[in-house]
């Protein structure tokens, strides 16, 4: 539920409209489904490795263990920076959401019953005030003991999942009962609109922008929206980050169930929400076009609020925008949690730091009596000060570049996770057949005590690696369209340069300046920590009927209810 809460922020509620504007309602669903397959591949790889070895910093620990130590440390640093930047990004979006106002011309055009719609009392407040307030709340919540923090995130996660289900039902109802009759319930998919946008403009903000049509336009549209969707889905890997602070891993099989649940919940709810709201708002709506150009102008650009406004519903736009603010604030709290835990895990590795920073590293490694790494929280929290960029008129541009850089950094992490799993898979396969290793059968993926196994996972890892690498190099293609956009090019590819620079810096420190003498350092360690095995007995999440002779029996009904509750709760 913590990971689910991390995924549900401004990405879904605001940027899903951007995806529909760029791709069209039908192609947007395909884009979300395609992105979900990458999440499915990455989460399966990360979940299995972490279930067997619940280590600190799993996003970079396995890369260092099974690929190369330099790759692990480089992955760790860019992951930390990505989450720290995302914290500022979420806070900036919170500040912009308070600017909530529809134009009178638009309200008159769609037939809204009131002349004005907005939050007049907050429009004159400087965004710096909101940034300051939510930055303080962000830090204070992260200083709570882990159990209390977990309950806060759980409650917020329950509220979010309830709200999304409500949004889906809400849009189904207003699609079925619309005040203005249309030819069919799929009127936004038919002429004068369409299943997919007729053309793609790589420069929507310039005067007379170029438009790419046909199959090439659809291809570019599909993969351009991936950047937006991965920003919306960012955070599902929190399942593994929280592993060392979970309890009852052996009995509850937490990581196995959480890894599968997060993929199912995010994929189904995202796709259903985008599909249903796409039935009520045409892809070329004025405020969706503004969102595409300006990134995060305000709550009035949310396609869910637009759906309520176009159907002349009072009150709901205010409620939706208020919940979006809560959602963005909670996502910011979670990104700070992830950043602090990743930095704390890095602080425990002297080799990941230069010699001059060892004293700082030792300070960051400390925790208080509750086990909270206060120093790493404070350092990561300071990056939230970037949110004060929102006081400038170009805040949307800064936010867009921050999110772009974070997405590229996380895609690099996804690629290294999948590559690590491929090495991990063959490593444990050899160990399972090595009689010299004590209890070698626990490395057998078919063993009944093996904590988490997915069918065809090695092929999923190969797919996830290839797709992630493709997106890493493809995402910034718009910067090359004339006129060349230097700032977008830097935002798109600086993470790649930094990643390889960190790898090179580690090898220079270890092996000297001659690249020909650089050596690969991958421990392939399978005993640190000892592999986790599940407790004997019936596996959670599996439906097994105890009474094989009588189908309709009390024991079988009870087993069925326990299985349903296990997957729904």
Image (cartoon, grey):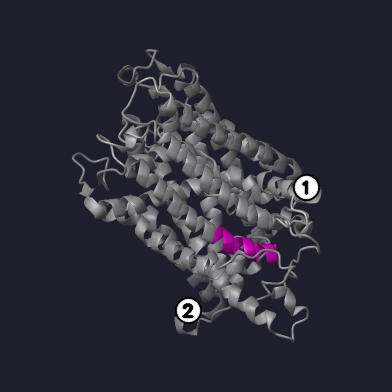
Q: Vertical placement of 383 versus 129: above or below?
A: below
Residue 413 screen position, x and y as percent: 51, 61
Residue in the image at 52% along x and 38% along y: 91
Q: Vertical placement of 260 versus 192: above or below?
A: below
Alpha carbon distance from label 1 to label 2? 66 Å
Q: Is 47 part of what is drawn in magenta?
A: yes
Q: Which quarter of the rendering shows the N terminus?
A: top right
- Which stretch is magenta? 42-55
Mark 1 residue element? helix
Residue 79: name its quadrant.
bottom right
Q: Give the residue number, with chain letter if any, for mark 1.
A: 558
- Looking at this view, name the residue that lies furthest to the left: 208
Q: Earlier in the sequence, mark 1 or mark 2?
A: 2
Q: Residues within 10 Å of mark 2 (few under 14, many from 20)?
A: few
Residue 100: name its quadrant.
top left
Residue nearer the viewer, 358 or 9: 9
- Secondary structure, magenta segment, majority class: helix
Could one spot residue 302 in this view of the protein?
Answer: no
Residue in the image at 56% along x and 52% along y: 263
Residue 46 screen position, x and y as percent: 60, 62
Q: Vertical placement of 529 versus 136: above or below?
A: below
Q: Residue 513: give its label.
A: 2
Q: Vertical placement of 215 versus 163: above or below?
A: below
Residue in the image at 62% along x and 56% along y: 342
- Looking at this view, name the residue that lies furthest to the front: 550
Residue 418 screen position, x and y as percent: 53, 66
């Amino acid at each position: 539920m913590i990971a689910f809460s991390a995924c549900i922020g401004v990405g879904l509620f605001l940027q899903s409209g951007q995806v529909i504007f760029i791709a069209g309602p039908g192609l947007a669903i395909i884009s979300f489904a395609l992105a979900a397959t990458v999440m499915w591949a990455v989460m399966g790889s990360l979940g299995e490795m972490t279930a067997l070895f619940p280590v600190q910093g799993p996003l970079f620990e396995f890369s260092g263990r099974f690929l190369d130590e330099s790759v692990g440390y480089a992955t760790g640093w860019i992951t930390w920076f990505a989450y720290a930047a995302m914290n500022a990004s979420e806070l900036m979006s919170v500040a912009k959401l308070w600017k909530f106002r529809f134009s009178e011309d638009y309200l008159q055009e769609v037939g809204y019953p009131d002349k004005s719609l907005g939050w007049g009392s907050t429009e004159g407040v400087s965004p710096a005030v909101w940034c300051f307030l939510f930055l303080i709340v962000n830090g204070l919540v992260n200083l709570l003991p882990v159990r209390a923090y977990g309950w806060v995130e759980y409650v917020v996660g329950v509220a979010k999942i309830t709200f999304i289900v409500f949004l889906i039902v809400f849009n189904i109802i207003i699609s079925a009962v619309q005040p203005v009759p249309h030819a069919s319930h799929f009127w936004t998919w038919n002429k004068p609109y369409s299943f997919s946008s007729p053309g793609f403009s790589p420069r929507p903000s310039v005067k007379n922008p170029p438009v790419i049509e046909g199959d090439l336009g659809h291809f570019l549209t599909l993969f351009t929206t991936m950047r937006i969707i991965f920003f919306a889905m960012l955070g599902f890997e929190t399942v593994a980050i929280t592993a060392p602070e979970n309890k009852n891993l052996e009995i509850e099989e937490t990581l196995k169930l959480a890894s599968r649940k997060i993929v199912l919940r995010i994929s189904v709810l995202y796709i259903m929400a985008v599909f249903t709201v796409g039935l009520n708002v045409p892809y070329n709506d004025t405020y969706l076009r503004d969102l595409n150009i300006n990134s995060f102008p305000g709550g009035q650009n949310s396609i869910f609020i637009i759906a309520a406004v176009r159907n002349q519903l009072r009150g709901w736009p205010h409620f939706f925008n208020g919940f979006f603010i809560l959602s963005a604030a909670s996502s910011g709290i979670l990104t700070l949690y992830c950043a602090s835990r990743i930095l704390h895990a890095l602080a425990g590795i002297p080799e990941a730091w230069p010699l001059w920073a060892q004293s700082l590293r030792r300070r960051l490694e400390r925790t208080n009596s509750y086990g909270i790494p206060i120093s790493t929280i404070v350092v990561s929290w300071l990056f939230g000060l970037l949110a004060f960029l929102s006081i400038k008129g170009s805040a949307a541009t800064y936010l867009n570049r921050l999110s772009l850089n974070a997405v590229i950094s996380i895609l690099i992490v996804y690629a290294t996770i999948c590559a690590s799993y491929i090495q991990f898979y063959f490593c444990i396969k050899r160990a399972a057949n090595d009689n010299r290793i004590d209890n070698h059968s626990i490395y057998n993926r078919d063993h009944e005590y093996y904590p988490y196994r997915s069918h065809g996972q090695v092929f999923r890892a190969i797919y996830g690696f290839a797709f992630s690498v493709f997106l890493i190099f493809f995402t910034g293609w718009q910067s090359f369209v004339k006129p060349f956009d230097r700032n977008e090019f830097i935002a798109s590819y600086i993470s790649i340069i930094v990643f390889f620079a960190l790898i090179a810096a580690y090898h220079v420190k270890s092996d000297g300046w001659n690249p020909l003498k650089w050596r690969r350092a991958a421990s392939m360690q399978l005993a640190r920590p000892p592999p986790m095995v599940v407790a004997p007995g019936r596996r959670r999440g599996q439906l097994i009927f105890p009474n094989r002779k009588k189908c309709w029996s009390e024991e079988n009904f009870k087993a069925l209810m326990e299985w349903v509750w296990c997957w729904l709760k």
